[in-house]
Each structure stands twice: as structure tokens, then as C-alpha cells.
Image: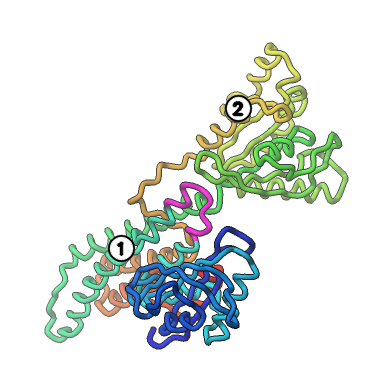
Amino acid sequence: MQENNIIAAISTPAGVGGIAIIRLSGKGCIELTEFVFKPLGNKKLGEQKANTIHFGYIIKDSTVLDEVLISVFKAPHSFTGEDVVEISCHGSVYIQQNILQLLISKGAALAQPGEFTQRAFLNGKMDLSQAESVADLIASSSAATHRLAMNQMRGGFSNKLIELRTELLNFASLIELELDFSEEDVEFANRERLKETAYDIELHIRKLAESFELGNAVKNGIPVAIIGETNAGKSTLLNLLLHEEKAIVSDIHGTTRDVIEDTINIQGLTFRLIDTAGIRDTTDEIESIGIERTFKKIEQANIILWITDVGTADEHIRDLAEKILPAIKNQKLILVFNKVDMISAERKDNKERLLKEEIPDRIFISAKYEQGTNDLESLLVKAANIPEIGEQDIIVTNMRHYAALENALTAIKRVGEGLELHLSGDFLSQDIRECMHYLGEITGQISTDEILGNIFGKFCIGK
């Protein structure tokens, strides 16, 4: 970016807090701030060294509005690559709004969502995948999502894509060099070596694409469907795990008629709990719709908690098994015997043998009296089977990245097939360039205003 207008926004969350930060960026923002800022000393902000903090007062109509600290960053050594000023003021909403309005009256424009990060991208401070990871870092709600976002923001994913694009560029250069000497029938590129290179690149792209399943689960939460007969304690268990009254609990059968979802963090992993309508034969039209949705959620879940009333399990579990087990494919199934406080140890041992072969993973709990829930949480973490994610692991978490990788994978496969079929260099070159194009879409080497607007429009204002 060359000449830009000065933008300003409140970068801290809305509401009252101890302090708030108002950020400005753009050529001249330091000089603009001088119009409203009276430093404790006589030295102007523009004369101060970069990366320094200064105490003083914001003046409005000859009146002190607030005591503030002002951080000065000078281009190109700032987040956006431009001159940047950050004003740390007291967290009063009145003060925040008055300072922002004062800056706008002096010529600043209110920043659009994500505009600071967009300027950082356009000024070459980060590529597009790193810019997207900023939003992921802000939204991270677990140790795993934080680690993935930090790795991507520090360039782990980008560096791998750059490495692959460089290999493809060398690949394409050799092929296209042959086209320049087509009349002389010379071969600069060893076809066997090119096959090995194409296969190696395909393996790397496939590995990245396949990591999306894990990345999506970590980022958006591992879906856990809580299913079972009516009045088995599904909603009670949901409320207990969430530590809030999310679902209505009643002794009346069929209370839950629609899907209720919320997330919980267990041992650094996010789980998306889904309370479903109880499964039973009913003539109630609305309840029947809820039961249909229950089976849809079974298909979408990674883990299924089948909760049953331990006191009446003998009567229902066999009938329900005929409906539930055929609907389960590759999901992890855990049988949860609830209301264990109501039966003796001998009867508990008898229940333990129910469907043991079909469902080896089971646990006894009392959702009402909070018995066994810690063990259930540990069982959920084990069932999630999420591998330890290290700082150097590259995991794809973004749907846009995954779609581009799938397209790149299709293109590089065609390159390999073309080499096997001894296709001419112009066809090979076209597929190589297409693969490079899709990898470039991820990092922003290939981008459009529509793509950028869609990405940065989802950011919060001030970031």
C-alpha cells in the first residue's frame, strides 16, 4: 500500500474496563494525535523515538478529558507496516467515545472490520494465511486452538506452502524451457525425476488436506451427541457438564423436542455437546421431528454418549439397540448407565453385562448427584483420540485453505498422470501452474478484492 488515509478504532472489547486502547494507523497519524495530546514534557510525539511510551493528557475544548499513555510505532516497524499510535486511556465508555470522536474530527476515519490486519497483509507484514490466524488466535478458547493459531501466525503453514510452490516453479521452469526449444527436440527435465518430485509434492499436499479433519474438530469442537430414551437424564447430564441450566429438566417424557448445543472445555480440548430428543415410539408430530433430528446428529457426531436409565435398562436397551446401532458408522460409542445411585452393587454387576460385546466402552454415573462425571470427562478425552499437537505440527483448520488444497491436489495428480502418459510439456505446464495458483490463493500470492473483503469483513473492528 502507498498513500493511505488515517484510520482509528477502539481495539479493546466493548464495555467498561480498567483501561481501553484506541489505535490509529496511517501516514500522519502521529502528527494528528499531537492535535489532541499534551505531553508531560515539551517534546512532540513526532520527535520521539519509535517503540516508546509517553504520558500526557487528552485535551478537548481546552479541558483535560483523560490522562493517557501513548505508544508510538514508526513505519515500517509496526503491526500494519505504517506509522501507528496506540492510546491507553481509562475504560469509561464516555472517555473512549469522546477520544475516538475527537480523532475523527481531526481527520481520522473510523476503521472497518479487520482493516488494521488487512493493511498488515497488503504492506507485506504477513501473508493471508497468517492474517487469518490472527482472527483464530483471538477466538481461541482452548490450549489446542491457541497452539494451532500461534503456529500458523508464526508462519509454519506458510513456509511449507512456499516450499511447495518453489518446487513447482522449478518444475514448471524446466518443462517450459523445453517448450522454447521444441523444434530441436531436447529434454532438460529428467522425466523419472519429475515423477518422483510430483509424487512427493502430492504426498505433502494430501497430508495437509487430510489434517483438516483433525484441525476442524479442534477448532470448532469435537461433536458429542447425547442420545437415549426419554427421561434417561440426557438434559441433566448436559446441564451438569456445562455447569449451567441450559436444557429444561422434567419428569415428563419427551420434554426435549429439539436439538440443544453448547461447548465445553475439557483438558484443553473443546467438545460440542448436543442434547437430543429422547428416542421412543410416539404419535406426537413435533416430537417425531425431534427424533428424526436425533438420528441426523448421530451421523454428524464424532462421539456418541448413549445414556440409559440403569434401573430400566433391561426393558429398553435391546429395543433401542436395534434402532441406534445400525445408525452408527465410525463414531466412538460410549454407553452411560445413569441413576446408579438407585440400584445395588449386585444389580450394577448385572447391568454391566448388557450389550458388552457390542459396546465395550461404558460407565456408571449419577448425573443428579454428580457421581462419575469426572471419569466420564476423562473417557470423552480418550474417545476423542486427539494426538499431541506440537509447535512444529502443521494442521489445517480453515475451510478456505482445505478447499484450495483439494483443488491443488487434483491438479498435481493430473501432472503425475500426464507424466505417466508422456503428455506434451504444454499440458504438464498448465497443470503445474494451476497447482501453484491454488497454493498461492492460501497465502495471498493470488487474491481478489472479493476474497479479501470476505476474509477481513469477519474480523472485529480495531483488529
Range of residues picked out in magenta = 136-147
Asked if disc 1 and disc 2 are in contact, CB closer than 8 Å, the reply is no
Q: What is the spatial separation of the Cα atoms under label 1 and label 2, in whole angstroms?
A: 44 Å
Q: Position of residue 406 (x, y in %)?
A: 43, 64
Task: Tell me what residue is drawn at x 56 percent, y 38 percent.
Answer: 332
Quarter-of-image position of residue 102: bottom right
- The amino acid on which the numbered mark 1 sits, given as a three-letter code, is Asn
Of 138 and 46, the residue lying toward us: 46
Q: Is residue 72 left or right of residue 230?
A: left
For disc 2, the neighbor class at 10 Å (few under 14, some 14 to 19, many from 20) is: some
Q: Which residue is mark 1?
A: 159
In the image, residue 343 above or below residue 151:
above
* Residue 438 in view: no
* Residue 373 in view: yes
Q: Is residue 171 left or right of residue 28?
A: left
In the image, residue 37 above or below residue 282:
below
Task: Tell me what residue is drawn at x 40 percent, y 88 percent.
Answer: 3
Numbered disc 2: secondary structure: strand
Numbered disc 1: secondary structure: helix
Q: Is residue 345 left or right of residue 439?
A: right
Q: Which residue is mark 2?
A: 362
In the image, residue 149 above or below residue 265:
below
Of 263 and 83, the residue lying toward us: 83
- The amino acid on which the numbered mark 2 sits, given as a three-letter code, is Arg
Q: Which mark is residue 125?
A: none
